[in-house]
């Protein structure tokens, strides 16, 4: 067991310590984290939203936070993973948590845990929940880390729970079918409380679990919906209709689905947290989420997207198709070894002319040459007479991005995707903060 950080330790020292506390990086189960939460006497007095799902969680959380802040409420937001700095995971009133505030909470959790071993995610989740419990908040938005049933965030009995989408990802932990994964995600729902599902075709396992526990299930297309034209869109719920809304600042094909889920959740708690129409309009315009179809200013066009599973890759492909003409598309691509690389390439392969394959660090990372070999194998054969895409290997995302910048013409586009680590590597190379 490494020694506990002393009073002079900084945030990096604490995070390094937390990484070495538990034998497994991911160890799903609520017993340990619940035991420490009880010792901390952890409780949230705010209206609480949990948001789970394969894709769309981050966008839905960002819109909920922005709308509630625009309505004048004090809001806590917990998301994961971070892109550049750990502090991004916790926001109070729109402000990223300071090192000092996080260290204070880490010390409290360390004092309370005794001999109980916690994973990095469990420990940091408890610390951030404790921060929120002390911040006199009106609302708390919590993004589920992995799955739902056994994720540390699920120790909280949320007032409203949202499942955004159910698709294949983290199959080593959650199962290899939509039904198995849907079952895990549905466990963030609670008896008698609003349970929002914005997946247009939810798995039967999710519907069955919601019925079995007596949750108040809101389904997209039945209990809430959206409609729109080129200028504006409208939300329709069970009792609330919001029309003449501007499109969300977050770009992409699925953002109205995510916005509708956020508005359905707010409809269910409107007696406790009334939200005027102007706050909805303003919040949708102000919601910000780095790395989700984020387009950087300047030429050539650079798109950052953390898409790392086939469902997210299909959405990215649709978003790329909706853009104007670009002579060539350059992909800066880095992906963890436990992801479905052939499934992702199948969605995007025909849209990319040049692949720049970046090595990623850590036990789940692989080197650029290995990744390039996998990409070559997964690419579909080029049509007769067409030029085959080029595939080259680089040590890291920064090198891959530099090579893409050098080769790309002014009218081309560069899409950086495949992992949070890939996007973070390029953002850091550009000297950008989130």
Image (cartoon, rainbow, N blue to C red):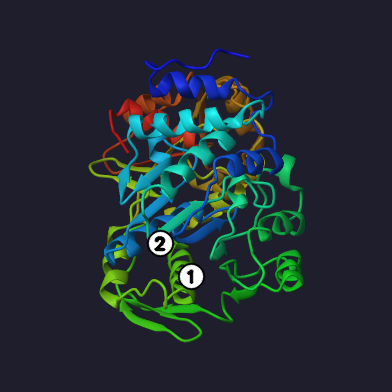
Image quadrant occupied by the C terminus: top left
Question: Which residue is nearer to you in this view: 149 or 205?
Answer: 149
- For residue 282, side relative to residue 216 (left or right): left
Q: Give how far across and how far down residue 134 sits, in percent.
A: 40, 47
Sequence-first tag of 1 and 2: 2
The residue at the point 72 percent across, 47 percent down is 174
Q: Is residue 214 visible?
A: yes
User: In which quadrant will I find the N terminus?
Assistant: top right
Alpha carbon separation for disc pair 1 and 2? 9 Å
> Neighbour class for label 2 at 10 Å: few (<14), some, many (≥20)?
many
- Spot occupied by residue 226 in the image (x, y as percentages of width and height): 45, 77
Residue at the (52%, 33%) spot, across then down: 109
Q: Secondary structure at mark 1?
A: helix
Which corner quadrant of the image does residue 29 belong to? Answer: top right
Is 225 in front, or is 43?
A: 43
Secondary-structure class at tag 2: helix
Q: Position of residue 278 (x, y in %)?
A: 25, 74
**Mark drawn on residue 27:** none
Q: Is residue 395 above or below residue 203?
A: above
Residue placed under numbered mark 2 in the picture:
64
Q: Which of 422/385 is in front? A: 422
CB-based contact (under 8 Å), mark 1 and mark 2: yes
Q: In this rendering, is residue 216 above or below 367?
A: below
Of the pair 91 and 403, the residue shown nearer to us: 91
- Give percent across and percent down for residue 122: 59, 37
Q: Do we see residue 304 in this rendering? A: no
Decide if residue 373 is on the left or right side of residue 426: right
Check the image and report above or below for 300 versus 84: below
Return the mark for residue 265.
Answer: 1
Which quadrant of the structure image shows residue 282? Answer: bottom left
Q: Along the horizontal axis of the image, is 213 left or right of 317?
A: right
For the point 67% across and 69% down, which residue is it? Answer: 191
């Amino acid at each position: 067991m490494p020694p506990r950080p002393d009073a002079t330790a900084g945030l990096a020292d604490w995070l390094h310590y937390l990484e070495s506390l538990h034998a497994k990086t991911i160890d799903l189960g609520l017993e340990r984290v619940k035991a420490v939460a009880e010792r901390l006497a952890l409780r949230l007095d705010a209206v609480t939203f949990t948001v789970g799902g394969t894709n769309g969680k981050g966008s839905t959380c960002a819109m909920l936070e922005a709308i509630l802040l625009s309505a004048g409420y004090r809001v806590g937001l917990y998301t994961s993973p971070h892109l550049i700095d750990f502090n991004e995971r916790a926001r109070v009133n729109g402000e990223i948590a300071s090192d000092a505030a996080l260290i204070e909470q880490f010390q409290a959790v360390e004092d309370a845990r005794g001999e109980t071993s916690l994973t990095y995610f469990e420990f940091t989740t408890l610390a951030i929940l404790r921060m929120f419990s002390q911040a006199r908040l009106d609302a708390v938005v919590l993004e589920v880390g992995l799955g739902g049933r056994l994720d540390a965030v699920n120790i909280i009995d949320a007032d409203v729970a949202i499942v955004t989408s159910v698709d294949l990802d983290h199959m080593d932990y959650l199962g290899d079918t939509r039904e198995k994964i849907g079952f895990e995600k549905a466990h963030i729902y609670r008896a008698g409380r609003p349970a929002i599902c914005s997946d247009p075709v939810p798995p039967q396992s999710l519907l069955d679990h919601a019925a079995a526990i007596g949750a108040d299930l809101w389904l997209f297309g039945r209990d809430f919906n959206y409609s729109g034209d080129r200028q504006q869109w409208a939300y329709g719920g069970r009792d609330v209709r919001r029309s003449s809304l501007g499109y969300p600042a977050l770009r992409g094909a699925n953002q109205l689905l995510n916005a509708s889920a956020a508005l359905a959740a707010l409809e269910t708690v409107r007696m406790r947290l009334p939200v005027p129409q102007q706050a909805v309009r303003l919040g949708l315009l102000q919601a910000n989420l780095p790395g989700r179809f984020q387009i950087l200013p300047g030429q050539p066009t650079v798109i950052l997207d953390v898409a790392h599973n086939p469902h997210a890759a299909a959405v990215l492909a649709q978003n790329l198709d909706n853009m104007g003409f670009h002579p060539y598309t350059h992909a800066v691509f880095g992906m963890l070894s436990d992801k479905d690389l052939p499934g992702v390439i199948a969605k995007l392969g025909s849209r990319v002319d040049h692949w720049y394959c970046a090595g990623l660090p850590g036990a789940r990372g692989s080197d650029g040459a290995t990744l390039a070999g996998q990409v070559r194998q997964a690419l579909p054969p080029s049509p007769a007479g067409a030029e085959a895409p080029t595939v080259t290997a680089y040590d890291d995302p920064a090198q891959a991005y530099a090579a893409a910048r050098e080769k790309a013409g002014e009218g081309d586009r560069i899409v950086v995707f495949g992992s949070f680590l890939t996007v973070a590597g390029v953002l850091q190379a550009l000297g950008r903060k989130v």
